[in-house]
Image (tube, helix red, strand yellow):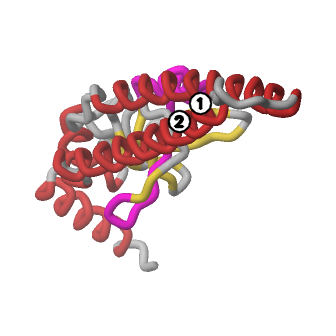
Amino acid sequence: PLSGERPQRLNHLQSSARRLGIMGVVGVRPLAPDERTRMNASSMDAAAKQRVKDAFVASARAELEALQENAQVEEDSSRLDQDSSFSIDDLSQADEAADLSDRFQQSREYQSQRLAALENLDVAPTGTVTPGAIVGFDGNRFLVGAVSSGIECDGTKYAGISGDAPIFAEINGLTIGDTFTFRDREHRIDFLA
């Protein structure tokens, strides 16, 4: 580029950024907290965040229903007809089915807790990483505070980050543009709603 072209282009970018209220995006100065929130709110509104939460809730509810069905099958299998005669194998299978039924019951309780936590998760727009925030880094999106393998909503895939996950300790309180190191790799928060 010509020597005068770069400053002229920078001046144009600065005036455009000033007009749009996004000075930090072009590197003129860091974004102030209120500017970060404003920028994030425009990238995903409250209704879109609610749809993501609703998809996580629906997925957790479906998992709970499947666990309940499986538990019922195992519980039914563990009952022997007391009016019939049965073999040692029948008793053994009934005991094993009862053990599985107990494990399914524990899983149902855990899944019920996960579902309740998701239903109570506040997904209001935010400018910092906290439970309820949707955060993006490395091309992936996550709902913070959700214990889930993932869902798809509005054409985007989301996974959950539990509040007790090791990565949560690294990203809690960060804002868009912040970097963090996890498992010897540096990451940058490039999306936050």
Q: Residue furthest right?
A: 88
Which of these two is toward me, 114 or 150?
Answer: 114
Count neighbours of disc 2 (C-alpha within 10 A) and say few if under 14, some if 14 to 19, many if 20 or more: some
Which of these two is toward me, 36 or 164?
Answer: 164
Which of these two is toward me, 61 or 71?
Answer: 71
Residue hosting label 1:
75
Q: Is residue 106 visible?
A: yes
Residue 1, above or below 149: below
Where residue 185 appears, x then y in whole percent?
69, 40
- 144 relative to 53 in the view: left or right: right
Distance in Å between CA atoms under marks 1 and 2: 5 Å
Please report the residue visible at 17 percent of the width from the left and 60 percent of the height from the top: 15
Image quadrant where one finds the C terminus: top left
Disc 1 residue type (three-letter): Glu
Q: Is residue 164 magenta?
A: yes
Q: Which residues are magenta?
A: 153-174
Please report the residue visible at 34 percent of the width from the left and 50 percent of the height from the top: 55
Q: Is residue 177 visible?
A: no
Which of these two is toward me, 105 or 10?
Answer: 105
Which of the numbered marks, if any, corresponds to residue 85? none
Which of the numbered marks, if any, corresponds to residue 72? 2
User: Residue 85: which quarter of the image?
Assistant: top right
Residue 16, above or below 92: below
| SS at mark 1 in the image | helix
| SS at mark 2 in the image | helix
Disc 2 residue type (three-letter): Gln
Image quadrant where one finds the N terminus: bottom left
User: Residue 2: which quarter of the image?
Assistant: bottom left
Please report the residue visible at 53 percent of the width from the left and 35 percent of the height from the top: 72
Q: Is residue 70 magenta?
A: no
Where residue 175 appears, x then y in whole percent?
37, 34
